[in-house]
Amino acid sequence: MEKYEYCENIIKESSQSFYKAFSLLEEKKAHAVYAIYAFCRTADDAVDIDKNIEKINQLKTDVKSTFEGVVPKAPLFEALYETIMRYPSNVAPYLDLLDGMRDDYYNKPIKTEKEFDEYCYKAASTVGIMLLPVLASKNYKSDSKKLKGVAIELGKAMQITNILRDVRDDLMRDRVYFPDELLEQFGVNIEITRTGLVTPEWRTLMEHYIEIAKEKYQIFYDHIDLFDKDAMYPTYVAAKFYEGILDVIRRKGYTNINRRYHVGNIRKYFMMKKAKKELKKRGLSE
């Protein structure tokens, strides 16, 4: 199987939202996004599905080797090597992501809001940083500090969204991402939450995180002009699709402890039209 086809199949099977958005990119950029996503998904699956820390260790060895020019004979790393040659970057965010996966494997407790923030950075902001050389290639060198800040906020917004979307499954595997100090502050009893009972305390906690995530999404929307012109719309749409999950959770009365919510295809269609109008109004789209 051709290396980019291998990576494309991974994103197509794992995230219809991301695939629908980033397949709008021109071919080389789309291939680069698929390669980066495939690496991240492979790392995530090593923990969530395979529960194999040795796979994380091997990924660390292989990605370091790839950045050094010694490419493992595997379509994932062949595609990733071609990507980093075409869109130069560094290995740091890849290693940070794997550190986050390691924390997940060992079920590292999250006690404080600072630790929660650090976890979101490792799990998702790293991905945004990996994508910057592809999606913001023109400003990556000249304004990398500002761009990195925007990518970090978007990544945290998306990770909070992931946590709220997947909370039921995480509770079933005894994984709690909400910091202990915040559960205490809002009076949320995790054992009651496991029963599926939606309490006023749970609703307040959910609304707290939805507002935080939406503020971070807005930072990204406000700075979309920093991205390459041909990447603005696909990236904007990807963020809107993800933010839409929060709106569904809110609309469904914070019953995300009973089912996993997503944005349907009809809703995505209208979100894409609205995104185009918003960008056009700002002079960022034809």
Image (tube, rainbow, N blue to C red):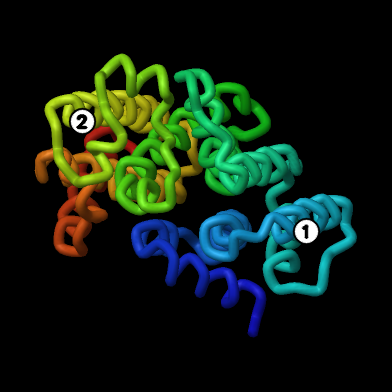
Number of residues whose C-alpha sits closer than 10 Å to that of mark 2, classed few (under 14), some (14–19) or many (20 or more): many
Say how many tags the image has: 2
The label on residue 268 is none
Residue visible at 58% across and 56% down?
A: 47
Residue 183 place in picture, x, y as percent: 33, 23
Which of 252 and 138 lies nearest the eye of the viewer?
A: 252
Contact (Cβ within 8 Å) of mark 2 with mark 1: no
Residue at image mark 1: 58
Which of 246 and 31 lies nearest the eye of the viewer?
A: 246
Label 2 vs label 1: CA separation?
Answer: 39 Å
Vertical order, 286 against 267 (above or below): above
Residue visible at 26% across and 31% down?
A: 210
Q: Amino acid at mark 2?
A: Trp
Q: Is residue 62 left or right of residue 159?
A: right
Image quadrant where one finds the N terminus: bottom right
Residue located farthest toward the front when viewing the structure as drawn? 191
SS category of the residue bearing label 1: helix
Number of residues whose C-alpha sits closer than 10 Å to that of mark 1, classed few (under 14), some (14–19) or many (20 or more): few
Residue visible at 20% across and 64% down?
A: 265
Q: Is residue 102 left or right of residue 29?
A: right
Residue 169 place in picture, x, y as percent: 35, 53
Which of 136 and 18 lies nearest the eye of the viewer?
A: 18
Decide if residue 285 is in sight here.
no
Vertical order, 185 against 230 (above or below): above
Residue at image mark 2: 202
Decide if residue 54 is in sight here.
yes
Q: Nearer the viewer, mark 2 or mark 1?
A: 2
